[in-house]
Amino acid sequence: MDKHLEEILQEAVEAIAAAPDSRALYEAKMRFLGRMGRVAALYKKLKELPPEERPAFGQQINDLRRIIEERAAELDAKLRENEMGARLATERVDVTMPGRRARQGALHPVTRVRNQLIDIFAGMGFEIFEGPEIENDYYNFTALNTPADHPARDMQDTFYVADGILLRTQTSAGQIRLMEKKKPPIKMLSPGRVFRSDDDATHSPMFHQMEGLVVDKHVTLCDLQGMLDEFARVMFSESSRTRLRPSYFPFTEPSVEVDVSCHACGGKGCSLCKGTGWIEVLGAGMVNRHVLENCGIDPDEYSGFAFGMGIERIAMLKYGINNIKLLTENDVRFLEQFK
Ligand code: DAH
């Protein structure tokens, strides 16, 4: 082998042998075989030789290369084995160490109550229907027997999106959408968000309602109260009772306010029920005949009842939550309590 090449080989062999670990070895190897390394420089020299000497010299460079590569590979295998051995010895995993506990999530109280309501009424044969959150004036008011200028429109402070288009103030709008499509017998449950310009400790501009609608032949107010009794027993307490008080909604006649006996004191009177023994929980009534007519259902043949409740209100009563804002602040310390 050419003397110069022999020298390079000697240096390379020494550098490789001196490498203390696989990383140093790689660096040593690259000093000779890398793109800018000593061997690459030899190819430049090769070009300067007279043509007849090139094949022999080229062959020698290739031999040099191969030998360096072989030496490096040999040592690399050894070094890696040692390094792996060292790692296995020091990086022992203590399988008896306690694990890190994963934080457990919980369903939001509004979701819990919504699911529970669906469970209760699905068990009585209700089907779920969801209407749009952006409604037009007709479905939210007019078809529900609340024409423009009707004083009852003032009961719900409305967000308008455009002329005649609004954020629904009540899930009752779904009653109309369903009855336009489906004829009796109807047993519908309609959960959803509603919006009103209203904001204090018990009112939020966005909240959830659960609407119920039953239309069939011979449906009476007694059927309504029977179902609501069942709802109160499952939602609040086994001994809960309901009572109906006369009220007014444009889309029901007669209309009632439904009170549930106070589950905190059992009806004796306490701070939750303000000493009355009763808590106002929802609005309901017999579907007004004009509403049935608006949907092409003959009020002389069919009758129905409807009810609507605020899901936040039920959750607040059930869990003793005194400020509705707690339900939208997403404070983990609050939400964690519902696991
Ligand atoms: N939509 C009423 C409200 O938001 C609640 C309500 C009352 C719904 C009586 C009904 C009903 O379906 O029959 O205040």
Image: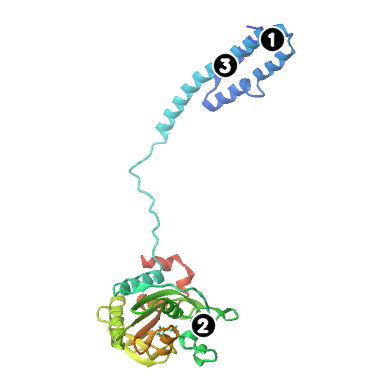
Q: Residue at x 31, y 88 (%)?
A: 221
Q: Secondary structure at mark 3?
A: helix
Q: Secondary structure at mark 2?
A: helix
C-alpha span from label 3 to label 2:
87 Å
Q: Amino acid at mark 3?
A: Ile
Q: Amino acid at mark 1?
A: Arg
95 and 168: which one is in front? 168
Earlier residue among tags 3 and 1: 1
The nearer-to-camera label among 2 and 1 is 2
Q: For this rendering, which residue is in front, 146 or 277? A: 146
In the image, residue 67 above or below residue 306 = above
In this figure, which residue is indicated by the disc labeled 2? Answer: 138
Please tell me how crowded label 2 is: few (under 14), some (14-19), or many (20+) other residues with Cα within 10 Å: some
- Which label belongs to residue 68? 3
Does mark 1's beta carbon lie closer than 8 Å to ligand 1? no
Tell me which label, 2 or 1, sits earlier in the chain.
1
Residue labelled 3 has its Cβ within 8 Å of some atom of ligand 1: no
Quote the CA–CA distance across marks 2 and 1: 95 Å
Asked if residue 58 is positioned above or below residue 185 in the image, the reply reads: above
- Tell me: residue 328, above or below residue 92: below
Q: Is residue 271 visible?
A: no
Q: The residue under label 2 is which amino acid type?
A: Tyr
**Residue at the limit of the structure toward the left, as seen here:** 239
Nearer the viewer's eye, disc 3 or disc 2?
Answer: 2
Q: Quadrant of ligand 1?
A: bottom left
Dot 3 alpha-carbon crowd within 10 angstroms: few under 14, some 14 to 19, many 20 or more: many
Residue 137 is situated, as x and y percent measured from the top left of the image, at 53, 82
Number of the label disc, if any, that sits on residue 177: none
Q: Which residue is mark 1?
A: 54
